[in-house]
Image: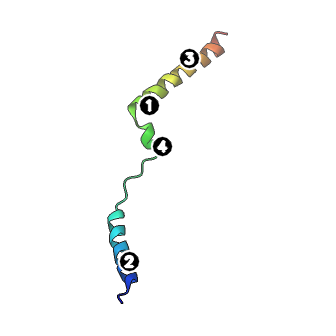
Amino acid sequence: MPDTTQLDSQLDTRQSETARVPDEPRGCLFALSQPPLMIFLAVIGCLLLMASLHDLLLL
């Protein structure tokens, strides 16, 4: 009767070698580098800045 545990471990190492190539992780900084998001955040920031300056200086 052949030993199947060695065959399973050989298959596992072959599969893990192909799966070892990790993709580059993309986190929060990748999302913030997108131009549409940065434009949206800049517009919201400018609106908040204008509203706060209006409250501080004109009212």
Q: Nearer the viewer, residue 52 or 8?
A: 8
- Please give the count of numbered marks on the rendered protein: 4
| Front label number (3 vs 4) | 4
* x then y, percent, for residue 34: 40, 35
Q: Secondary structure at mark 2?
A: helix
Cα–Cα gap, marks 1 and 3: 20 Å
Q: Secondary structure at mark 3?
A: helix
Cα–Cα gap, marks 2 and 3: 66 Å
Evaluate if marks 1 and 3 touch, with contact meaning CB atoms under 8 Å apart: no
Residue wearing tag 2:
8
The first of marks 1 and 3 along the sequence is 1
| Front label number (2 vs 1) | 2
The first of marks 2 and 4 along the sequence is 2
Cα–Cα gap, marks 2 and 1: 48 Å
Name the residue furthest front.
Answer: 1
Cα–Cα gap, marks 2 and 4: 39 Å
Residue wearing tag 1:
37
Q: Label 1 is placed on what type of residue?
A: Leu
- Give residue 49's mark: none
Q: Label 3 is placed on what type of residue?
A: Met
Q: Quadrant of residue 22?
A: bottom left
Q: Residue at x 45, y 37 (%)?
A: 32
- Give residue 50's mark: 3
Q: Residue at x 38, y 77 (%)?
A: 8
The first of marks 3 and 4 along the sequence is 4
Residue 42 is left or right of residue 10, and the answer is right
Q: Nearer the viewer, residue 58 or 38?
A: 38
The N terminus is located in which quarter?
Answer: bottom left
The first of marks 2 and 1 along the sequence is 2
